[in-house]
Image (spheres, rainbow, N blue to C red):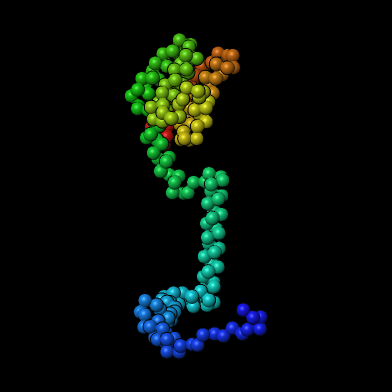
């Protein structure tokens, strides 16, 4: 081929091109026109809410809700940190504790008679120990999870699940028994009467009124 030769294009067949275009447009499998996008209609209640929130009254209501929400969150945090109970949670546990923790009156009075017999012979330590052990049995029968082999009497007395009334009376009994057990001295009659009075508080209905 000579360097100066000019390349010529083959002649265009206009009729063939027109026919090919016609066949292309007639092909229903090919979509040339895209559907026009129609935005969804906003519900009337949503339009009203948007208008209300942008109004002066809506803005005031919004900030009231924000302040109330922050106050509730702060109250819940303070309650969790300081273990505060709601007012309606305070009365019922106390009322239930009276029935739940008080031993049956018959066995409790029989126990006191047995302990009084020991105290009458001057065996105040044995009498106080008897009341302590029976009190632990009473607690164990009602809340077995509180009394475990590794716990001391003082640990049981400090248990948070123990209601206030039984805890105070039981703590007094524990303190008196520890005087002889760890204090290295014998109990006196006054110690015994204090221990007996504490058990009565622990056991009998009239002491809870």
Picture coordinates of residue 57, whole percent (x, y): 52, 75
Q: Which of 51 and 27 is in front in this view?
A: 27
Given the current orientation, which residue lies at the most extreme left position?
106
Q: Which residue is drawn at 50% across and 23% down?
A: 150
x and y percentages locating residue 182 in the rendered image = 58, 17
Residue nearer the viewer, 122 or 128: 128
Residue 167's spot in the image, x, y percent? 48, 31
* In front of the other: 131 or 112: 131
**Left or right of 16: which side holds 56?**
right
Q: Quadrant of the N terminus?
A: bottom right
Residue 117 seen from this side:
yes
* Total numbered circles: 0
Q: In which quadrant will I find the C terminus?
A: top left
State the image coordinates of residue 96 (x, y, percent, origin top left).
Answer: 39, 38
The quarter of the picture where residue 26 lies is bottom left
- Compared to residue 208, the image places residue 42 above or below, namely below
Identify whether 50 is placed above or below 110: below
98 w.r.t. 198: above or below: below
The residue sitting at the right extreme is 3
Q: Which residue is drawn at 56% across and 45% down?
A: 82
Q: Is residue 194 visible?
A: no
Residue found at the very far front of the displayed protein = 1
The structure residue drawn at horizontal position 49% and vertical position 28%, both measured from the top left corner, is: 156
Furthest residue in direction bottom, as rendered: 14
Q: Which residue is drawn at 59% across and 17% down?
A: 183
């Amino acid at each position: 081929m000579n360097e100066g030769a000019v390349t010529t294009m083959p002649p265009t067949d206009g009729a063939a091109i027109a026919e090919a275009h016609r066949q292309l447009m007639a092909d229903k499998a090919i979509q040339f026109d895209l559907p026009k996008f129609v935005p969804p209609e906003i519900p009337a209640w949503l339009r009203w809410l948007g208008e209300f929130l942008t109004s002066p009254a809506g803005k005031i209501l919004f900030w009231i809700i924000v302040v109330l929400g922050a106050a509730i969150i702060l109250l819940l945090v303070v309650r969790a940190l300081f273990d505060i109970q709601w007012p309606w949670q305070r009365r019922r546990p106390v009322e239930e504790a009276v029935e739940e923790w008080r031993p049956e009156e018959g066995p409790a009075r029989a126990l006191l008679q047995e302990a009084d017999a020991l105290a009458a012979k001057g065996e105040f330590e044995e009498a106080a120990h008897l009341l302590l052990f029976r009190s632990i049995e009473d607690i164990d029968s009602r809340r077995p999870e509180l009394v475990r082999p590794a716990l001391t009497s003082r640990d049981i007395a400090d248990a948070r699940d123990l209601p206030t009334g039984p805890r105070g009376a039981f703590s007094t009994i524990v303190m008196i028994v520890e005087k002889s057990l760890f204090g290295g001295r014998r109990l006196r009659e006054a110690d015994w009467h204090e221990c007996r009075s504490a058990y009565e508080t622990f056991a009998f209905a009239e002491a809870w009124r």
